[in-house]
Image: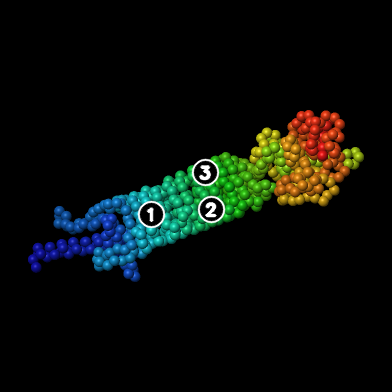
Amino acid sequence: MTRKKLLCSAKMALLALFCMLYAEANAVNGTYHTARDAHGVIWYFEVVDGKAQIVGWKNTETQTGLDENRLPYSEEVLYPTADKKLVVPVSVVSESDNISYVVTSIASTGMNETELTKMEIEEFSFENGSNAIMQSYLFKNAASLTRVLLDNYVGNNIPDYCFQGTSGLIYIGVNNGLTSIGKDAFQASGLQSIDLSSSSLTTIGYNAFGGCGSLSSVKFPTSLSTIGDLCFRYCGALTSIDFSSTQVKSIPSECFHLCASMKDVKLNDQITSIEGSAFKDCWVLETIEMPASLTSIGNTAFQTCKALKKVVFKGSTPPTFTVNSFYATSANPLFYVPVDCGKGYKDKLKAVDVKVGASTSIPATDQVREQLTMSKYGYMSYYLENEDFVVPAGANAYVVIGKKTANGKLHADLQTYPAGKAVPAKTGFVLEALNNKSQVIDYEVDKTDVEVPVSGTSLMKGTAVEQTFSGENGTYYVLSSNPDGSGEIGFFYQKGQGGNAMTLKAHQAGLFIPKGTEAPAGIFTFGSDIYTGIDEPQDVTSGNAVSGEIHDLQGRKVTRPVAGIYIVNGKKVLIK
């Protein structure tokens, strides 16, 4: 063989070796079967147990040849997929053996972000009838991907890191059978919203949606029970979250950390814990309701929630706190707790010295409040079993008391408690709103330094639970508007009881006048003037038996009175 022929053979052998090495180097994790589809995509797959497991895809081809120096070269030539779609086929036909293989799984190509962007794939989906299951890292950093359609996907899991870093992804349609979303599955993606409500989802993994800065809306199914730490951390566009119909039992650590637009949070009645930094730096969150099931609030759970004004606790048993549970909440939030439970909450807050405010200088115990709703008349009876009641601004409280007179009898009178003073626990009283009626009133409790003892024997009976009082030697009255329709507020026989008994709802109070008390069996009235004793109407058989002018309670003259209460010679008279 001549030298020229030897050299030519050597070059051809070198070229063949180079092409072979290049092909092996550019195959994904080895040498695989290839197949082409109608979208212009080359699929790489391996055959396991007669099934195709896709390990990658490309829309480039390797071109080889000799350069101007007659040396071997190769390059990747890009050709477009006409519709910019990547559709996982039900089966593929191998270019090497012309055999059709059913596709059972699809894994990441290992391509970097630049390569995936060049591919210009905007939509990813599965052919109807596909049995392929996605693997982890499938589209990690695929910046050009904008839509993912999983309607035909048979898998029940979106794997770890599957769509992590897909900055162009704005929409995903999930399948009904989806039960779990893996770790970092959509972390730092461009998702704007996701509706999971029709799925069977039970679990969302660690940091699954963390850093999705455009995510503004998430809808959950009723089946959801577990969410991972950091799940929605740094989702700055997320304005609300609703767990009210889910089975979630814990809000994990940093779950909504730095969700700076989060304003509305709804929790369900099964949540037992809010872990450390769960809502840290939710700067516009103003109000949150804590379910009765809650048992603990972790360290810095609401740290730097600058706008937090109102925290509503529904449980009669307070959760445990840490000293920094509400660290640096500059709006000085008020803690609203169930009626007659404020002392228990104060004790829990005081035990760990919880503070609030921009400089955390305000004891959280000072922020505890309870609420009541006044009647339309501006009066109501009230009773607390476990704590004193601090009369709020714009109100007065009255306790009907009995004082012994010189003759040893009990004389009924009023003791007034102005705003800022506290009615002792286990003392029934009447609360008067001086300005607005039918208003919700905030009040404080457990401030014994302003408590004023009852200066006699309280004639009022109160209860913490619904209860019927009867059987004592005297007369029972409940606070009510006058049955005559005059609008007068006072103590009257309860309908159907005739003064022999009274039934009170929880935290109500009534009046009991023992037999022999001065001015017995009357009505104690409230209005523009507060009567300082009990009026004793005179019982007569008819209006004709009354001497003197008769006027109704509005001051109008009456000539033929019917049964009711009237003013006769300046005194109240009961006409039967």
The front one of 191 and 92 is 92
Quadrant of residue 398 in the image?
top right
Mark 1 or 2, nearer chain start: 1
Q: Is residue 32 left or right of residue 232?
A: left
Vertical position of residue 287 compared to residue 80: above or below: above
Give the residue displayed 58% in from the left and 47% down from the top: 289
Which amino acid does the dot numbered 1 rest on? Leu
Return the residue found at the far left. 2
Closer mark to the observer between disc 3 and disc 1: 1
**Element class at badge 3:** loop
Total tally of numbered discs in the picture: 3
Which amino acid does the dot numbered 3 rest on? Lys
Vertical position of residue 496 compared to residue 575: above or below: below
Where does label 1 land, which residue?
149
Q: Are marks 3 and 1 in contact (CB under 8 Å)?
A: no
Q: Is residue 313 left or right of residue 57?
A: right
Give the residue displayed 78% in from the left and 47% down from the top: 497
Give the residue displayed 73% in from the left and 39% down from the top: 481
Return the residue found at the far bottom. 49
Q: Position of residue 175 (x, y in %)?
A: 42, 57
Return the residue found at the far right. 407
Where does label 2 land, which residue?
245
Which amino acid does the dot numbered 2 rest on? Ser
Q: Position of residue 427 (x, y in %)?
A: 76, 45
Q: Quadrant of the C terminus?
A: top right
**Element class at badge 1:** strand
The front one of 501 and 145 is 501
- C-alpha distance separating marks 3 and 2: 19 Å
Where does label 3 land, which residue?
263
Tell me if residue 118 can be seen.
yes
